[in-house]
Amino acid sequence: MRIKEDLMLRNIVGAWIVVPMGERLLEYNGMLKVNESGAFIWRLLQTDNSKEKIVEAMLEEYEIDEETATHEVDAFIKTLTDAYVLEGSNGSKAY
Amino acid sequence: MDLKLINTFAQNKIINQKWHDFITQFELATMQNGYLPSATFELTAFCTLKCPMCYVRIDKERAEILGGSPCTAKDWIDLARQFRDQGGIFLLLTGGEAMLRPDFPEIYEEISRMGLYISLFTNGTTVDEKMLEVLIKRPPAMVGLTIYGASEETYRKFGGHKGSFQRAIDGLDRLLTIPNLAIDVRFTACSENYKDFQEVYELVAKRNKLVSFDFGSCAPVRGASSDARKLRLSKEQIKEVNGVLKEIYKPVAQVYKKLIGGIGNNNQEEKEISSLETDLQKDRGLWCKGGKNGVYIAWDGRMYPCDMASYPYTFPLEQGFKAATQDIQHQIDALLLPERCMSCINKNIICGCIPKAQNEMKDCARSGNKCGYIPKQELEPEDRELLVV
């Protein structure tokens, strides 16, 4: 799964925001805000990545146990899926 | 972990206030952290119309006298990239008529991939099928489209070629085919067209849009020439137009004042922006939101503090965007309200803005004519609230 094209993650004044561009702009009608760890996962999902690989990267980056990391990644992927920003095997959702 | 979707615009036909609120909130955060969130690029000063009250349009002959050469597509793309890299997020593309440039598609397509919220101002006449294709592919965050009248006759007074009114309406209709596109339709009034307002309102309402009313006939800037001062609405005309406004906006009374955009509409964030730490007095510097949070780059690549300013200016193409911005910020502090304006009866109504006052002053000094603005105290109380900005 990966983040759809034309959603640019930017850090402005310490805040992570996602600016939709092109046709995405008409789908999202505004901006997406993510926190620091959300931005970390977002960056991983800018290329095709699996949930397992993301959990692995989370364990390397943050001092958390595997159960917590899995729970966090699952929750964030669900949020992304519900916001229709993912495409690919685990993230596809029909409009 | 958290992801929030902040819906801002294109949710409602009354989008301008939502867009305005969104920008204001974000601008406050960026400005408090020393970033410059907004910029305006005047891609060309040429236009398809010759509105007699336009304060920025320059014709080709005038451009030759003024000298300077227009920025290339590469220049604009480079400036946009530099603006983005210094933390910029809101970019307005305007003119003249921005889409009159043959290389507009090249500029736009490149800039629209930079992670900026792009707004585009137009008079609609350049939105043909080809331009629509460009905008459908990569829609801007918002289009501000100004309609100047309700007939070919009015458009002729505004220097339009035959069929200009129809082209403007066709342009609006084409933009309306882009689903969810935020379109803010405006009407800019002067004594030559104010009687058309009701008809314009009706033809826009048929398209399920509201039209906002503006009567900002500013004195010309940066070498432009216009009859703005002669064409300002008189006291009687203001009264007449207020009557129309009251009637047509009755169904949307709660947003009525905001659509007109004037006095008493400042929200908390705007107030906070206005009160950002400054040691400037009111006869010095810039204290408005526009002057604090953005810069204006004119057709020839000079950077100004805002669209109203004829000076100071810097050279972002030579200095780099960031250095040119810092240079401007320093020079703003030296802007002074002309001495003669200090005792003017209109000072606190119109010329509270120093660049505006300086533009007005050029003519006051030359001809001794007053600016033609109506002092607030001379208007009926109900008219003061609606139209005096």
Image: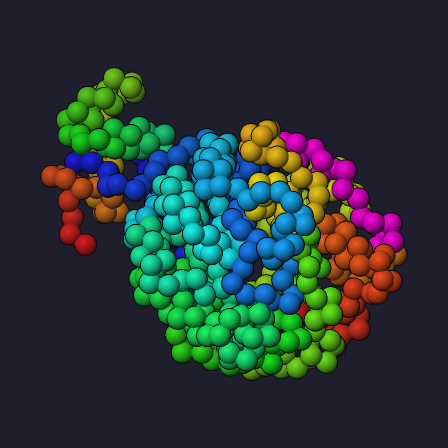
Q: Give how far across and how far down residue A5 sits, in percent.
A: 26, 41
- The mark tally for this picture is 0
Camera sees residue B11: no
Choose top left, top right, bottom left or bottom right for residue B214. bottom right
Residue A23, placed above or below residue B3: below
Give the camera-side residue of B214 and A51: B214
Give the camera-side residue of B6 and B45: B45
Is residue B276 covered in magenta?
no
Residue B108, placed above or below residue B324: below
Q: Give how far across and how far down residue B167 sits, in percent.
A: 43, 70
Give the camera-side residue of B54 and B248: B54
- Magenta-drawn segment: B325-342
Chief secondary structure of the magenta span?
A: helix
Residue B228, placed above or below residue A62: below
Camera sees residue B354: yes
Which residue corresponds to the image point at 32% horizontal and 65% vertical from the top-left? B177
Residue A62, placed above or below residue B121: above
Which residue corresponds to the image point at 39% horizontal and 71% vertical from the top-left? B170
Choose top left, top right, bottom left or bottom right for residue B326. top right
Is residue B338 covered in magenta?
yes
Choose top left, top right, bottom left or bottom right for residue B47. bottom right
Which residue corresponds to the image point at 38% horizontal and 41% vertical from the top-left? B110
